[in-house]
Amino acid sequence: MAGNRTFTMIKPDAYGAGNSGAILKMIEEAGFAIKAMKLTKLTAEKAGAFYAVHKERPFYNDLVNYMSSGPIIAAILEKDNAVEDFRKLIGATNPADAAEGTIRKIFATSIEANAVHGSDSDENAEIEGSFYFSQFERV
Ligand code: ATP
Ligand code: MG
């Protein structure tokens, strides 16, 4: 059975453009409840650790630089079928391929600066949430 939690980040481009409030509004209107949230800034080391699965990819160094370039908002979200439904809400990695009305279609500026992160499995949602939040920081 699909889990009911996922993990997201509002990435530096979207935070820097002042789109955090609009994105959180879309997330809440889509039926997700915020169960933990924090504004923080990743060091390059932490960004590298978060995206370690991509360390062999050609875009890894750029991704680490970009994700540590400015503040991000990290959050744990709750909804039935959270991981799959959230990936639908954010749209394809490349905003050029993202469906109309999705967060990335509206707010992303490139395949790298693509506004938001969404976990790709229940297992990764738990790992990623634990990267930012202790059990005492979740409601
Ligand atoms: P995320 O994990 O951030 O939710 P995703 O699952 O849609 O995104 P991944 O394949 O996991 O996509 O890539 C992680 C991130 O790396 C992307 O969101 C994007 O910021 C960056 N990225 C992915 N592919 C490329 C690429 N070809 N060129 C530049 N950056 C990329
Ligand atoms: Mg991913």
Image (cartoon, rainbow, N blue to C red):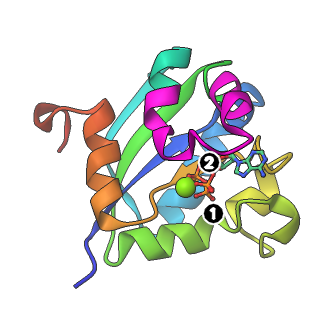
Q: Nearer the viewer, residue 132 or 73?
A: 132
Residue 83 picture location, percent across and down: 41, 68
Q: Residue at image x 68%, y 68%?
A: 91
Badge 1 element = helix
Q: Where does the image place residue 71, in percent across and percent down from the top left?
A: 59, 21
Report the quarter where the N terminus lies.
Answer: bottom left
Q: Quadrant of residue 14?
A: top right
**Magenta residues, as a range?**
48-66
Relative depth, front residue between 101 and 60: 60
Asked whether mark 1 lies closer than 8 Å to ligand 1, one says yes
Q: Is residue 36 magenta?
A: no
Q: Residues within 10 Å of mark 1 (few under 14, many from 20)?
A: many
Q: Residue at x 71, y 60 (%)?
A: 93
x and y, in percent, of residue 9 in the image: 51, 41
- Residue appearing at x 63%, y 36% in the figure: 11
Relative horizontal placement of residue 112, taking residue 91 as reference (left or right): right
Q: Which residue is mark 2?
A: 116
